[in-house]
Every structure is written in C-alpha cells, then in structure tokens.
Amino acid sequence: MAREIAFVRSEMLGEKPPPASIVGVQGWIKDNLFSSVSNSILTVVALYLVFVILSGILPWIFLGIWNAESLAECREIFAERYGDGTEYACWAVVKARWHQIVFGYYSPDQYWRPILGFILIAVSIAPILFPKLPKKLFFVSFASLFLYPWLIWGGSFWTPITAALGAVIGFFAYRYVTERFGFLFGVLAGCAAALIWWSFISGFAASALQSAIPATIAQVSSLNLAGFVLSITIGIVAIVASLPIAIVLALGRQSDMWIVNKLCTGFIETIRGVPLITLLFVATVLLNYFLPRGVEFDVILRVNILVTLFTAAYIAEVIRGGLAALPKGQYEAADALGLTYWQAQRQIILPQALKISIPGIVSNFISVFKDTTLVSIVALNDPLGIANNIRANSDWNGIVWELYGFIALIFWVVCFSMSRYSMYLERKLQTGHR
Amino acid sequence: MKTSIFISALAAAVALGGLASAQTLDDVKARGKINCGVTEGTLGFSARDGEGKHQGFDVDFCRALGAAIFGDSEAVEYIELSSKNRFTALSAGQVDLLYRTTTWTFSRDVDLKTSFVGVNYYDGQGFLVPTGLGVSSAKELDGATVCIETGTTTELNLADFFRVNGMSYTPLPVGGTTEAKALFEEGACDVYTTDASALAGVRASLKDPAAFQILPEIVSKEPLGPTVRHGDDQWGDVVRWTQNALVAAEELGVTSANVAELANGTDNPEINRMLGSEGALGAMLNLDADWAARAIAATGNYGEIFERNIGENTPIGLARGLNAQWTQGGLQYSPPFR
C-alpha cells in the first residue's frame, strides 16, 4: 500500500520569504507611493516638485563661497567662475561674522565666558531633563543660577558667592522655622532672612572679600550683550523664572480665597490681553518716562522681567488646564487622607497636573525662545538685529538669504530639540491613565 | 516687583524733578564718556564692523566730540536706538545727544522738547533709475512706473512732484527696501524713489551699480542733525560748535594731516582762534583751548569724514550735492569763529 504512494514529504518545508514585491524597498514603494492610479500621479508630481526645489537650493547651498572679504568679492569670483551671471550663496558673510551672531559683541578673548555659561546651563538642566543622573548635579543647577549672570555681565567673583550665601541662609531659616512654627511661617522667615542678607549685608561682604582676595573678570556692558547670547539669556531666564511664578498663579486662580483668586486672575488676564511687543515697548520706552533721569535700570533686565511675566501668565493657564483635568477624586482622596493644602499640592495634585501640562509648557517655552527675536524691534541686538547691522556694512550690503538662513538653522536646531525632548518626557512619564 | 519700581520711580522723579535742566557737560565730564545715540545699523551712517566697533558718518561726529571734550575719540559709549525710542531715550537722559539720522522738523524741535543744533547731512527724496533708461533729470520721467513704499511721506512727495511738473506715473506699491530692490532689479519698475542716502545704499548693493544712477533732483527736505535736550544750551553749544569746527575746518583748508602744524599758529586769524593759538574760544565752551584741533585731528574735517564714510570713492558713492561747502554751491556753512 505504502509503495503506491509516489512521494511523501517527510519533513516540513522551511518558511519562504514573502515575494519581493510585498516587502522591502520595493514593497514599501508599491504600498505607499503607487498603490493606485491617482496616488501614482500624485507621487510623480510630488517627486518632480521636490526635484525642482532641491535642484535650485542644493547647488546654491553647496556651491557657495566661504572665502571672500565682501559680497562684491563673492560676485567677482562667481563672475570669474561662471561668467553668465550665475550666483550661489556667499557664505563668506557667515564665516566673517558668525562669532557676532552667536556671541554678540564680547571681545574674542572673553568668548570663554558665554561658552562656559552655556555649558553650565547644559549641566544644570541635565538632572531635570534626565532623572537617572545623580541628584548631586542639582548643586550645579543652584550654583549656575548665580554664576551664569556673573559670567555674562562680569564683575567681582564675590558678588555671586555672597548672593548664593543669601539663598542658603534663607533656606536654613526656612528649615529651622518650619520645624517649630509650620510651613507658612517657614516660607516667610526664609524670604525675610534672604532679603535682609541681600539688601544689607551681602554688598559689604562682597566688597570686603573683594578687597581681601581680588577676583574680578571684566564687566561687559549690556550694550554689548547681543546675538544668541542675548536670546538664550532672555529665553533661559524667562523659562526658569516663569515656571514657579506660573505654578503660584495657577494655584492662586484655583484658590477659594477671594483676594488671591481675583489678583491672580487679574494679573493673568491683563498680561494675556496685551501683545508681547507692547510690553517690550513699556519696558524700553514707557519706563523711561517714569524713571528719574540718571537712574540706571538695565534695559535687558527690564526686558527680561516683562518677558518672564508674559511667559508666566501663559504657562499659568496651561497648568490651570492640567489642574482642571485631574479627576475630582484625587482632591477628595488627598482631603480624606488628612493632608494639608500644601501637602496635597506637593504630593498628589501638582505632580499629576504638571505631567499633563508638559506638552503645553514646552510649546510655550519654544514660542518664548522664538519670541526673543521681537526685542530687535526695541533696538536690542538679538540675532536678527545683528543681521540688520551686518547688512549695514558696505562689505555685506545686499546680503539677505545667507544670514537669515544661518540664524533660522540655529533656531530650528534649538526648538526642534526642545520639542523632541518633550515627546521623550511624555513617553517616559506615561503611567497608562489613557 | 513692578509696582515697587513704579512707586520708587515716581518718588524719585518728584525728588529729582528740579534737576531736569542739569548741566549735561558736567555730567559727561564726571562720567568720562559721552553717551551718543546712534541707529541700529544704517549703511554708511552707523554700523558695527567685524570687531564690533562702531563705524560711520554719524559715528565720526560722536568721536569728534569725544576728542574735543576728553582728547580721546574712544571716550564715547554708542547706544543703539530705534526710531521709536530715540526721543524718550534722549529726554530720559539715557543718551546725551542723538546723531541718529534724525530729521529736523518743527514739531520735533518745538513739541518734543528737543533741540536740533545743526545739520550734518542734508538728505532728501531722490530717484534711482537704470542708466539704460536714458534720462538725466527727474523731469523727464513722464509716464514712468515708480516703485514706492506705501503709506509714507515719500508717496505724497512723489505725487506732489509729478503733479507740479504736469507729469503722470504708474505707482507700483512695495512693502520695504528689500522688496523694492528685488522688483527694481528685475525691471518691474523704471524708477525707485526714497531718501537719497538710502538710494545710494540700494544702488551699492545691486549686482552692477554702474548700470544705475541717482538723478540730481531732490524733491523733499530731510535735514539730519544732532539732537540734544531742550534747556541745556551750554551742552548744545558744545555739540553745535564742534560740528561747526569740522565744517569750518574744511572751508579753511584745515585737515587731519596739517592740523597739528597749523595749531602752532598761522597768518589766518580765524584758524588761530578756532585751533586755540589765539583768543579763548575753548574756555567759553568750558573746554580746553585745543578742543577743535583735537576733534579735527581725530576724525578729519567735514569733507574728510564725508569722503571716508559715504563719499564718491566708497561703495556707497554719494556726491556732496547739498552737503558741499557753501563756497562750492552747497549748504554746509559754519558761522564765523570769532
């Protein structure tokens, strides 16, 4: 019987790869680009458009000239090379002036200061960005709060040291009083101790230490603070300082206390009802009318304060959204556990509300960083202001795309990394409520 | 924070209100530096170079002041101001004077409580045309297409000029200089009109500047000059006469090259009085006797400043025109040093 069967497969056939037209590059192309007639037409048209655009832009970028002294020289070189009026990018302007766009008008031997400042910022936000890093890095964050302004503006090394000491004193006063009289008095005592130190003692201490051990770096006038150093300074200050203010404002707006509630709501709505550019004019023009003659109130500090308040008002609304999104049960559970208001906020409400708010907060940060370019309207030299100034030199008069392209590239890199980071953070903090 | 600043500012303003007409010259001397308000970047007039130093026509007048007061043309702090915050910066004392391409007008002089103490550049609206158009005067522009920035006084001046001369034109509205330049370069309009100094900058930035010319007619008055606060005539005199010294120096043939030699005394009494070897003009200004000589040595006379920054041998290539000496048919004229 068995002999009648001509062939019996005694083992299973191995799996075969799917046909080439379904997987791999070919399959992907077929699935995504040519799945139907209309899609095929669209693909061809789109590819043609991409080709046209790239064939215009890529040679312009890559055949550009890096070594020239002026736009006129660039044009001479192009005329020599092609002779038919063909012109590509004149990157020489970026090569000649990139240091001004990035570092502003620091003298070159002082460039280490903004560079060190940027590194400090990077190190100090690292423990916030990546929770796996050792918590001791927070000391760097604390130190950089005082060291960064010193690096940027210069002056005696003892000024940031004594200023930091004030914060430490305030902290210990807070700890000491909180243990005995509770949280509210602790905060008040901490603030009072720090303020007393800063307004009466730190100045003397700094000058005494300075005369004992002189340690000074050259002062840089705010007039010379420009370029990305200025944008990043305004941006970082606004981001760092606005978040705590925003949290307080958001809690205040949710508060049952009438005065606190109305004050916070009034502040938020006033600031949000006014365009940033108006606030910048208030900072640079209007304040001049109120301040007496001869009173020096640094214009960058003024702009910084108003940009911070502006950002805080917007972020407060984002956080309020986060607070409102929390299920009521969370509040009730906190109450049921007998937690005080601040304990509940710290342990239960804020961690969840802030987590929900992260995308909104980061997109506010991105927009405030880009909004720093508005200061060029009030004659501060942000990168756009510097570009205008470079174009006012007869060497580079007439250059447009190269400068703005370079500036746009830097802005894009910074803002894109921020947005990618916020996506990473969202995934990491996802605890599966949705 | 904001409220407390407002309150303290108000209190301080009340306390210091009586000092509004403080002696700027004394303040400047005590500070050791002049705070000079300049533009954020205007071709030829003020811009920072690759080292971050300010250069330009307006800047040189600030440097001359530094040399006149301190003997050091670097004793100047340049404060870049926008056209919007320049007057408040001046009246608030943030700057001691403006050399900021500011047009002298009635309302600014009278209503804004500023004083114009001279004119260092007579600007005005001009016309830029391709040489291929074959016109040599703006009066031959009948029927031309004109690139014009909308909503500006230049638009009104243009309409007036063409109506007075019985000509017609087609306006091509543009949003700003960069857009205008692009349209003009590709031949969308025959004529581009704006202030002559800006036209020179546009012309210099074109691929082939020689193929374009600025017509000789100037159809509006834009006298640009140094501005100080009302009510401080002593400081106004210092600024006015330093600039006058530079103008007079050109008229009298005093240059940065020969000023040191001439300062020892010449047979021209006016040069002697100006450079301080005769009389006591410097003391009348509360300055040293050789104030004018130092200013001229630092920057050269008016003509040298003009030629170095915006003159015909620079890429900008502005002709002297109205800014020639009065002896050469221009308007630059210094009252006598006597």
Image (cartoon, grey):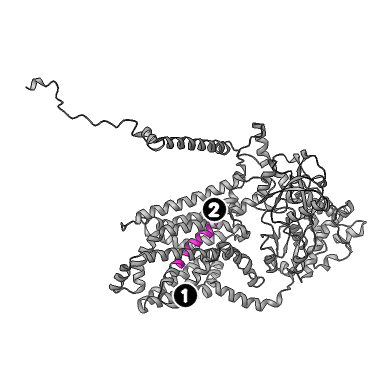
Mark 1–mark 2 Cα distance, whole angstroms, equals: 47 Å
Q: Nearer the viewer, residue A301 or A357?
A: A357
Q: Quadrant of residue B263?
A: bottom right
Between disc 1 and disc 2, the foreground one is 1
- Residue found 42% across the figure and 64% down from its top: A319
Q: Position of residue B15 (x, y in %)?
A: 66, 79
Q: A121 left or right of B225?
A: left
Q: Quadrant of residue A3?
A: top left
For the stretch drawn in magenta, the main secondary structure is: helix
Give the residue pinned by disc 1: A262
Q: Is residue B75 magenta?
A: no
Q: Position of residue B256 (x, y in %)?
A: 81, 52
Give the residue pinned by disc 2: A112
Q: Is residue A114 above or below residue A282?
A: above
Q: B156 left or right of A278?
A: right
Q: Nearer the viewer, residue B320 or B249?
A: B320
Q: Residues within 10 Å of mark 1 (few under 14, many from 20)?
A: some
Ranked by sequence position, the earlier of labels 1 and 2 is 2
Tag 1 secondary structure: helix
**Amino acid at pointer 1:** Lys
Q: Which residues are magenta?
A: A230-246
Q: Among all residues in the image, which is located at the extreme right?
A: B267
Q: Is residue B63 above or below residue A401?
A: below
**Amino acid at pointer 2:** Trp
Q: Nearer the viewer, residue A402 or A187?
A: A402
Q: Is residue A233 magenta?
A: yes
Q: Position of residue B330 (x, y in %)?
A: 86, 53
Res. A147 visible in picture:
no
Q: Among all residues in the image, which is located at the extreme left?
A: A1
